[in-house]
Image (tube, coloured by chain):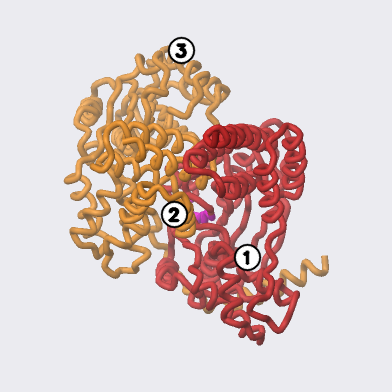
Amino acid sequence: MQAFLKSAKSQDKSVGGTSSEVVKPKKRQNLAPWVEKYRPRRVDDVVEQGEVVAVLRKSLEGADLPNLLLYGPPGTGKTSTILAAARQLFGDIYKDRILELNASDERGINVVRSKIKTFAQLTASRVTPDGKPCPPFKIIILDEADSMTHAAQAALRRTMEKESRSTRFCLVCNYVSRIIDPITSRCTKFRFKSLGEEKITERLKFIATEENVNIGDDALKVVIDISGGDLRRAITTLQSCHRLKNREEITSNDLLEISGIIPQSYLQEFFDVCVSGDYSKLESFVQKLSFEAYSIGQMLDQFNEFILTSKEVNSKQKAIICDKLGECSYRLQDGGSEYLQILDLGCTIMLAQKQK
Amino acid sequence: MALWVDKHRPRDLSKLDYHKVQADQLKNLCKEGDFPHLMFYGPSGAGKKTRIMCLLRELYGGGVERLRNETMTFTTPSNRKVEIMTVSSNYHMEVNPSDAGIYDRVVVVDLIKQVAQTHQIDTAGQREFKVIVLSEVDELTKDAQHALRRTMEKYVATCRIILSVNSTSRVIPAIRSRCLGIRVAAPTEEEIVSILQFTCKKESLHIPEGLAQRIAQQCDRNLRRAILMLEACKVQQYPFTINQEITELDWQMYLRETANQIMLEQTPAKLEKIRERLYELLSQGVPPDMIFKGLVQNLVLNCDMELKAKTLQFAASYEHRMHNGSKHIFHLEAFVAQFMNIYKKYLADMVMDDF
């Protein structure tokens, strides 16, 4: 006890001593990441995605809203769209009218039976507490629905139909194939397309001017290449780089470093080493790669692209290599050792090279 | 008496020995009131932890070095109690959630919620957020990683998470895209040499250039190991000589010996002997994936290309299976048996060719 008190006291002292060193935050800044800050507030702000916006706009004008299933690659605005729609539909009370569940919440079959069902059974009135009219239903948003178990999805089926008078479901997922058929047939499906280059550029430029980011057109192009149509990733990259450089100009090298993309020279070197057929060279190359802390998973992704466009191997070799590539990538995801997987791939390429 | 590794660990971002540009960037990051979640990745002994501690010090001042150990208990859904050690200061908390084995999801969710839901008491003179340092995130189960992704977004106002991983391959893309990745490459041999010399100078010892270079070559570009080797050398013999023996890790020697025995004889009786040796290694706490790596490295030395490819193919598939299974020894032994099989065939073919 004594010791505890003592240490607590000395701690106080140290805090007092150092607090002068620590720069005091000027005032409570808006700490929200740009992704949150620039999330579309209105359905009309959503970029591209024509059909779903049209449907939602109709429902804002008073038409009925179907159950929705939004799917598409990450960062295309699925969650943003439905949140913006909810905000516009319900105004101030939108927090009471939506139930948002995602993969981090417990979402087994029990939750579907209890939480979702009870929420669904509540009736919603046609007016808000302060007398404004609003649509007489609630929305349950199931984010990342593809990670729900099949049992939990099956338990949803009847609930969706029975409570259709007062509740709309909106399922958001990346892979529609992981949603069971009975659910997809109860929903209107909307596919979110990857965002086009111009749209992302436009949005990024808007944010860059708002936040005084010092970035040239070339570097902006790199951001877009890295993001691969994922606007969230593009914005996060931009923000991180901006922080890291502290208002200096952002160059394309910084961007590549942050995103963890492996320089093209390494891919070429890996291929050359394999073509040379020298095992010890391959081994030392793999060592070097791991010392440089490049991720082998990333390497495999990029190497896939590399080998597909390569002119030095014929179609049959490509088939052999890509087959192995897929296997190695799967094992790696599943927890296999980086070292063995990449060497396995390397050896396959060596052998494939020999049989011309 | 602290080990040299701890004693001479840089405590300030400006005192780091290599990756200086990165250190400046990290400093910039702290200047603003706020920073994103971070993910430090790099091989072991490259200085991830050192950089994290320096960063925290830059943020909060010396207070972060007053550490205390706490044991926390969590209850799993099946009513089992999981205990886990945490190291924390007033400003941050360090946890290794993979200690909890398959219950890591509970730890991630409960612990982070607990910490994140409490605000800092006195925000004057402090940051508005706490930092949670999670190490070995690549060892987490997929379930726990998925739980982490939403938690990271939800509590962004009160806490920042710093992840430390060896390789990003096993971290799910959703987490990777939420963090600012910071690559910590291993120091080069020259850098290790200069650090070794610097350390010796601080200890007022003299080290010949040759010895420093030999240590640098043997340490696999792992700085921690290099400094430990140096200290071991000092204990063995001082003043240093250039050709002084550098103690190798004994499990590495043991592993090499095991590989040699496999090459010598390929019979079921031998396999049984090898099993004992593998058990010995496992019971000494050598991680099974290191055993795999070591075995493969030594076994392929005197094989031809085709055999090498085959060995690697089997090693890769058995190693992968090992991660899904629970008994490591089965898969290690299966690999050894398989290798004996293909090697024996290879030898037999060679004899046939001679005729």
Q: Colour of chain A?
A: orange
**Amino acid type at mark 3:** Arg
Q: Colour of chain B?
A: red
| Residue position marked by numbered label 3 in the rendering | A158
Question: What chain does badge 3 belong to?
Answer: A
Q: Residue at x 37, y 28 (%)?
A: A175
Residue A57, located in which quarter of the rendered image?
Answer: top left
Residue count near mark 3 (Cα–Cα under 10 Å), binned few <14, some 14–19, many ≥20: few
Question: What chain does badge 2 belong to?
Answer: A
Residue sitting farthest toward the right: A2
Can residue B145 be seen here? The reply is yes
Tell how many labels: 3
A10 lies above or below B292: below
Residue sitting farthest toward the front: B355
| Residue position marked by numbered label 1 in the rendering | B225
Which percent across, then down, holds residue B234? 71, 77
